[in-house]
Image (spheres, rainbow, N blue to C red):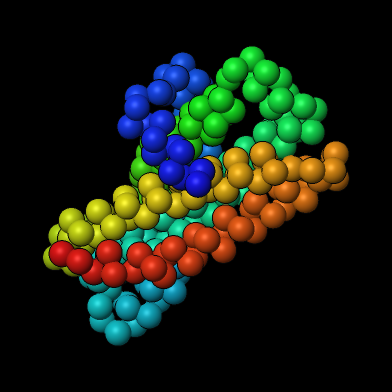
Amino acid sequence: MLVAKMFRLIVRGRVNYRLLVIQMAQLGVNSIPISCLVMAFVGASLTYILAGEFVKRGAGWAVGAMLLLVLLREMIPVLTSVVMAGFVGASITSEIGSMEITEQIDALKALSTDPDWYLTLPRMLGVVLMMPIIGAFAGYAAFFSGYLMAHTRTGLNYPLFMFAVPKFVEFSDYRACLIKLVIFGATVALVGCYYGFNTKGGAAGVGRAVTASVVTSIVLIFALDLILMPVQFTK
């Protein structure tokens, strides 16, 4: 029902752009450093395994391409979204949950302001619009750290590291990554808002809502990743 209401508000053009820009900065821009840090460690760890095995078998030229494929198809959308669930989803739930238990949501309704329009829509659109940008920064951090690991461990130079990328990586891989990032971002924001609006029981209730929000978001991310698996193999 919340998804349907957001869709109706967007179709009707009821978007407060000032609130949207604020949420894009707070939820999106502030998430870039932690996402890049996590993905840099992921890229280096993956390359440590890939470079060692591929170079040992005389296929060092394929390390960069295999790393980028794994990142685009799974690691960037899934792990970036998991980071967002813990960083952004928890923030959204705690903020709206605190407003709920202090009756600020009721005050908005008394002023004839739709809480979903004022609170949910800017946060959902802000996260959705920023997810591709966050994913791009995080993906570059992972790929670059992967190259540094490959160069340090096996001595691969950059031209050889990039040699097979144009042959193996296709546009459909980037498209699938983008689709997943958008869907996972919307999921994190909507789940966070849902649990925030349904917070009960004071400060302890906010804690329970935040925990439930993060856990639900992570489970849904992995479930949706499996459901969307055919998308990344559609040319």
**Which residue sits at x=50%, y=46%?**
1
Where does residue 36 sit, x and y in percent of width and height? 48, 46
The quarter of the picture where residue 76 lies is bottom left
Placement of 170 over or under 103, stated as above or below: below
Q: How many marks?
A: 0
Where does residue 139 sit, x and y in percent of width and height? 38, 50
Image position of 202 (left or right of 47):
right
Image position of 25 (left or right of 166):
right
**Which residue sits at x=26%, y=81%?**
58
Q: Is residue 91 visible?
A: no
Q: Nearer the viewer, residue 183 or 53?
A: 183
Q: Nearer the viewer, residue 116 or 146?
A: 116
Q: Is residue 71 visible?
A: yes
The quarter of the picture where residue 95 lies is top right
Where does residue 70 sit, x and y in percent of width and height? 35, 66
Where does residue 27 sit, x and y in percent of width and height? 54, 33
**Which residue sits at x=46%, y=45%?**
3
Quadrant containing the C terminus is bottom left
Residue sitting at the far bottom: 57
Q: Nearer the viewer, residue 26 or 197?
A: 197
**Which residue sits at x=32%, y=77%?**
55
Placement of 52 over or under 164, stated as above or below: below
Placement of 52 over or under 147, stated as above or below: below
